Amino acid sequence: MDSGAEIDEESDNRGSMWVLDQKLDQPMDEEAGRLRNMYREKKFSALLLLRLSFQSLGVVYGDLGTSPLYVFYNTFPRGVTDPEDVIGALSLIIYSLTLIPLLKYVFVVCRANDNGQGGTFALYSLLCRHANIKTIPNQHRTDEELTTYSRSTFHEQSFAAKTKNWLERRPSRKNALLILVLVGTCMVIGDGILTPAISVLSAAGGIKVAHPDVSSIVVVAVLVLVCFFSMQHYGTDRVSWLFAPIVLLWFLLIGGIGIYNIWKYDKGVLRAFSPVYIYRYLKRGGKDRFTSLGGLMLCITGTEALFADLGHFPVLAVQIAFTVVVFPSLLLAYSGQAAYLMMNKDHVVDAFYRSIPDSIYWPVFVVATLAAIVASQATISATFSIIKQALALGCFPRVKVIHTSKNFLGQIYIPDINWILMILCIAVTAGFENQSQIGNAYGTAVVIVMLATTALMVLIMILVWHCHWLLVLLFTGLSLIVECTYFSSVLFKVNQGGWVPLVIAAAFLLIMYVWHYGTVKRYEFEVHSRVSMAWILGLGPSLGLVRVPGIGLVYTELARGVPRIFSHFITNLPAMHSAVVFVCVKYLPVYIVPEEERFLVKRIGPKNFHMFRCVARYGYKDLHKKDDDFEKKLFDSLFLFVRLESMMEGCSDSEEYSIYGMQTEKSRDALMSKNSKATTSDVDLTISSMDSIMPAKSPLSCRNSMTNSSRQAGNQTETDELEFLNRCRDAGVVHILGNTVVRASRESRFYKKIAVDYIYAFLRKICRENSAIFNVPHESLLNVGQIFYV
């Protein structure tokens, strides 16, 4: 029996997993690659840091920067009765911007990024690497050896260890955490609907200020939105260089106008920097003042999009942009509007546009419209990104994802989601009676996302950062004081538009949770019904049937063991291919898996069975691009495995060995010159043991220590198997996909039958097939069906 054969799938540590590293050519811009490497090394020159800070304005801060268009109107929808109310509202705005965007997000939450990636799913992925809370337990110890799989350790008796054990003890706690993440995700999707609606409608409102006789502002806003969503498939690569100058010009304009209004109308508004006026504002007005907080909290909208769009820039660049440009400009803009309202209480509906000097009115209107479009684009991009993350982690139906840029990995377009967002956005814009109701809906979505982020950050601070419980308590207390106050305020406005994001979130939450439930049940079915290796070995090399020329790629969700569809297939058909490869495509809680660490290959059974397993690993930011040749990469890895296996046969079986990152020209030439069909441009070789990574002999040194006879025999065996695999490949490759149909059992309750037999079945019917994701030719595809009752 071969030492590398997989005999018992429950004791994989007997053999050795061979990780095949291949640096394949990728169409990546050299400049983007250089900047990405600098991000990882965290080495930035002052000039580069300023450049990145400037670029982050257009991507990260568009949504937050357009809030002055609508905050005061949504705070005082019935008008201003007392000038002191304006001072109190301004004081609340100042301290809300200081506590939430500045202190919480820019200086704390942004540090909790997952290798530069932000958003609720990035936080969840970070937690999954530090605690066993993932609901689909398909991880393996070799996954932790990835360069992007960073995690920390802690003492068994520490508070972090106790928290980890508490989370892992019951599945209900894992599900509760998942639901929290899904709720936050659904609210971000709601932001993607409401941000374009309120931003574009507010910007278009400038036409009515200049021309009061114009009454079709909603029509103009709808036309802009239709054009905006219709252009999404082109991507933003060609015009993204304009975003940063537009947003920078916007911040300079609103800051300058704010200074002008403070100087012209009322310098006394600066006393709002005293928190005493917050107390006076709330004490004086009763319930009306308390419910007005729902409008005031719109000043911090876009903060969650700030975190979700973090992936393109280092944290330090984002922090510099906010503290130097964004924060001062917003304070000046709101102070200027407050100064104007102190003298013009009746103009609260259009406070922003009416406070603009006449000489620059139309230039500011144009820039405001462009800034609203940039803000909408930032939110839509964040929505696409977070849906892609949810899809990768098995929490969203498979949809088509298009990569729109050759230079930047994160720029994607999801057609189905784009049109759904457009329809809902137009419905919100045209369906509400006034902008205030959209603001109420927007505020509800934003505050719920912030509460979800706070809950996840508490776990991050304990499990990942190992903070002292006093620091955790301080962060949690300050965050909840502000966010719970705003949340209780927006609850009073549920019947005034606040119900919209709740309905949208409930619909998406139902879809995502039902899909995830079905995915988990399918995986559990695969695990519990997998075929024992003893049964496979008992069939013999011919598997008890005719082995026809060709290679069969059997796709399965199992990273270990033989799937049930294989036994189902060979039981009903009298023939099987000469070589069989079980292909498992799995997603890990990391943002990307480097191409050179993508595949793990292992032999199943003796050599004359010609059966292998190949695990293809992806992160939640990895894309299956149309020009990727998944099949070619898989066979390159398989051929390389055969060569490496032959080279290692002369080493001691009892020796733990690992070769990591061997890149010598000698080894590449020795490996790649034997078979032109498996040639790649550059190859890294990694052979990792199941239990540990430790330095040892290289394959070349092992090979030199072999006797001449064993080396010749090994080379002959290697050549024979490679020729055999090449003949099988030339004879034809068939992709065998399992089509497991999940149905509710007769004893199930009615709600499970509705969820499984109708909702999940409908989603499976309309979602994208796996064969389309991996570009499998239709003529080479074979589906094997089976039914599973839950």
Image: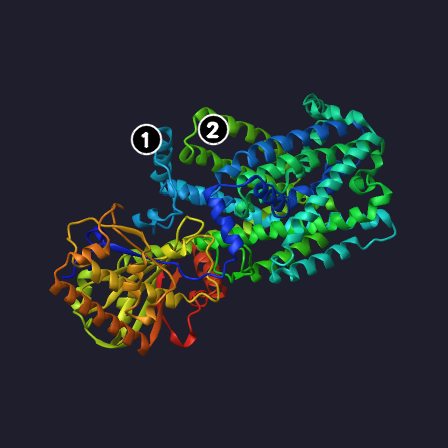
Q: Quadrant of the C terminus?
A: bottom left
Indicate which disc residue 591 carries. none
Q: Quadrant of residue 479?
A: top right
Amino acid type of the residue that numbered disc 1 sits on in the rendered structure: His
Which dot, 2 or 1, sits closer to the camera? 1
Q: Which residue is mark 1?
A: 155
On screen, residue 275 above or below 767: above
Callout 2: helix, strand or loop? helix
Identity of the residue drawn at 55% across and 56% down: 411
Image height of 174 relative to 404, above or below: above
Question: 328 or 508, which lies in front?
Answer: 328
Residue 496 visible in image: no
Q: Does the image show residue 137?
A: yes
Up the image or down, 554 lies above or below 41; here it is below
Secondary structure, mark 1, is loop
Q: Residue 701 placed where, x, y %? A: 20, 54
Q: Amino acid at mark 2?
A: Val
Q: Position of residue 336 (x, y in %)?
A: 77, 34
How busy is the neighbourhood of tag 2: few (under 14 within 10 Å), some, or many (20 plus)?
some
Compare residues 234 and 323 and report the one nearer the observer: 323
Mark 2 to mark 1 CA distance (whole Å):
18 Å
Count up the numbered dots: 2
The disc at residue 472 is 2
> Image point 29% across, 74% down: which residue?
726
Tell me where residue 267 appears, x and y as whole percent: 80, 26
